[in-house]
Amino acid sequence: MTEAIAPETLLLLAVATPFLGALAIPLFRNRPNPREAVTLITAAALFLIVLTLLGAMAGGARPSLTLLSLGAGWSIGFALEPLGGIFALVASSLWIVNSIYSIGYMRAHHEPRQTGFYACFAIALGSTMGVALARDLFTLFLFYEILTLSTYPLVTHKRDSEAMRAGRLYLGLLLGTSMLLFLPAIVATFAFAGSIEFTPGGVLAGRAGPVAIGLLLALYVFGIGKAAMMPMHFWLPAAMVAPTPVSALLHAVAVVKAGVFSIVKIVVYIFGIDLLAESGASEWLIYAASVSLILASLIALTRDNLKARLAYSTVGQLAYLVLGAALATPTGIIGSGLQLATHAAGKITLFFCAGAIYVAHHKTEVSQLAGIGRRMPVTMVAFLIGSLSIIGLPPFGGVWSKWALATAALDAGSLFAAVVLMVSSMLSVGYLLPVVARAFFLPADERGDPHDPGRISEAPISCLVALSSTALLCIALFFGAGELERMLESLFGPSAGAP
């Protein structure tokens, strides 16, 4: 059916469909099954739309539309290009499995306010599509802010004092950085270049000197607080008080991914990698990303709470994308794009497993997980697969992004960045694999079930389906990453991925 719809219309539908779902979900607030069916149907429809758009892009189409012209070169509009296409694909596909997981998790916990939860989730996905498909900086900024506001109720879902404190930090830091740094950066870009539209090769070449370019880049990097670059990362570990499906949304599907995606897209389409390479204006960012990457990994080693450990892992792992952008080479951008997809699959698997352990056995600390692998074999095998992908070992998808980034570092002559990548991988072994070793090789804590401590007791089936699916995705990306790489290579081909 969608084949007869113009790509420009599909572009609009990709953004509008989740918002329409958010309007429909409250109509079934007293009927859980239809309410959750609306969520799943909306997610599936969005995924189908995105797949159709990517098919059109593979055929050479680059649909673009202006939704609202604001005058003086400012507008709200959408366009499809390879980076945004990959982000849209990641978010729309993982929304389906996250929704399946949420049904089992929220019901097992008898969570309150489930209608609002699913509605806000849908708004967050619509905002994510707006970020992914934004044609210019103003459109990206608008949907970036809607994403912040729509996820605040999810972070504060429990409404206890800890959740409200986390919510205040979340809202204050993300709104503060965007208003004080991100928005001024957009205005400065317009003042320098007379344009804020995403343009192949960038819009700033010949418009400002290296110092101004470097300062402007800093405004974007630290103004996009969702990227969780240190020291703008504090909101992310604090937000782990939210239900696990929200943690998965924050780390793998939307929020942090929207941040690092925005930085990479701005590097490619506003600055242009040639400008950054020639001016050396992004060299400082190599060191800033490396500090964030290593320091976050070291902190993860010290955290006993499993979700906190995974949160700091995210801070480090997504600094890979910023590092790839800072290298200012085509291979670095390709590595960043691959990391966007492979990290999403691995990290959502790990959070799904953490939530499954909590649902089935109410354990939250790594020190409590001795022997849990014999009681939850499916969950902990999935955790192992997700861990190996995050570390970057074959045959799991994460190996390709790590390989591309290491190659980019060497091509750019940055032995420092290559060493940092190697050290980071070793640190990720240190904070992930001991969880698996403890689960399978240490004797079980019989206090959890003195009558039958060896009995298999997994989370609800919908949780298992979701975490098994994303674990298999980690494997599938090892064999299927070539198609994503070809999409990213088109950024630097004859058409330069023109929106």
Image (spheres, helix red, strand yellow):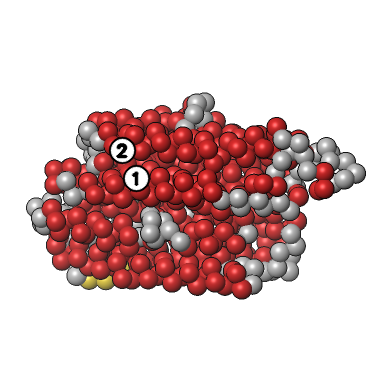
Task: Tell me what residue is drawn at x 10 percent, y 55 percent.
Answer: 209
Query: Residue 319 appears at what percent x and percent y?
Result: 38, 47
Query: Residue 390 appears at what percent x and percent y?
Result: 50, 38
Labelled disc at residue 21: none
Front-most of residues 379 and 261? 379
Would residue 213 be found to the left or right of residue 48 on screen? left
What residue type is disc 1 on? Ser
The vertical placement of 473 against 263, above or below, is above
Would residue 290 be found to the left or right of residue 254 on screen? left
Q: Quadrant of residue 240?
A: bottom right
Sequence-earlier tag: 1 or 2? 1
Q: Is residue 166 visible?
A: yes
For label 1, the crowd category at 10 Å Cα-Cα, with few meaning under 14, some 14 to 19 and many 20 or more, is: many
Front-most of residues 200 and 383? 383
Q: Is residue 252 visible?
A: no
Identify the residue position indicated by label 1 in the image: 290
The vertical placement of 221 against 473, above or below, is below
Identify the residue position indicated by label 2 in the image: 417
- Do labels 1 and 2 touch, CB within 8 Å? yes
Would residue 128 be found to the left or right of residue 450 on screen? left
For label 2, the crowd category at 10 Å Cα-Cα, with few meaning under 14, some 14 to 19 and many 20 or more, is: many
Q: Quadrant of residue 431?
A: top right
What residue type is disc 2 on? Ala
Query: Residue 362 appears at what percent x and percent y?
Result: 73, 53
Task: Tell me what residue is drawn at x 25 percent, y 64 percent.
Answer: 186
The vertical placement of 281 against 411, above or below, is below
Task: Tell me what residue is drawn at x 63 percent, y 36 percent.
Answer: 436
Helix, strand or loop under label 2: helix
Give the CA distance from mark 1 to mark 2.
7 Å
